[in-house]
Amino acid sequence: MQVQTWKMREIYLKGFGICVREAQPKAVMTSYNLLNGTHTAENRGLIMDILRAEYGYQGIVMTDWVTPMTGDARSAHRDSQAQYVAAAGGNLFMPGNKGDYDNLLQGIDSGAVTLEQVKINASRVVRTVRALTQE
């Protein structure tokens, strides 16, 4: 989907932002589709700039259950990758498997994501789980 920034903010994000600011949910899920050519789960602008910085969101961000797109002959796009999700500020890559773990390690080795980013993402999950168990 191709969307101009002002349209995205006025049409799609306005209601979402109100909900996040007022309710502060413990978790939100990204969609598995592309937005202006980037997986929403890999979109740092959506996750860190808008959701976290602008809306003040403190909970965890998880991917939708990633569905393989590359096996579909109609798709020219690669699947979402754990290293890019982590670099964008995502906390949980669903459903997660050994291949995703290996992809994350490759991302650390290549510099696509830093170990510090991974630690920050993991600590947010731990804080959220602790808060839920104390309620």
Image: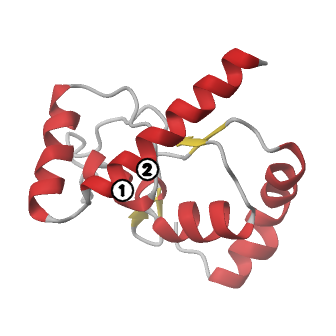
CA gap, disc 1 and disc 2:
5 Å
Q: Mark 1 near mark 2, Cβ–Cβ under 8 Å?
A: yes
User: Residue 65: percent from the left, percent from the top?
Assistant: 44, 31
User: In terms of depth relative to the viewer, which is nearer, 50 or 121?
Assistant: 121
User: In terms of depth relative to the viewer, which is nearer, 12 or 28?
Assistant: 28
In the rendered image, which residue does mark 2 sit on?
Answer: 120
Tell me what residue is drawn at x 46 percent, y 49 percent: 90
Q: Quadrant of residue 21?
A: bottom right
Q: Quadrant of residue 3?
A: bottom right
User: Residue 78: percent from the left, percent from the top?
Assistant: 24, 54
* Amino acid tagged 1: Gln
User: Residue 93: percent from the left, percent from the top?
Assistant: 39, 37
Q: Quadrant of residue 53?
A: bottom right
In the rendered image, which residue does mark 1 sit on?
Answer: 117
Residue 87 visible in the snapshot: yes
Q: Mark 1: few, some, or many residues within 10 Å (few <14, many ≥20)?
A: some
Tell me what residue is drawn at x 74 percent, y 74 percent: 9
Tell me what residue is drawn at x 40 percent, y 65 percent: 38
Left-right relation of 43 to 61 = left
User: Residue 73: percent from the left, percent from the top?
Assistant: 21, 47
Left-right relation of 132 to 79 = right
Residue 62 visible in the snapshot: no
Tell me what residue is drawn at x 35 percent, y 59 percent: 87
Q: Mark 2: few, some, or many residues within 10 Å (few <14, many ≥20)?
A: some
Left-right relation of 100 to 92 = left
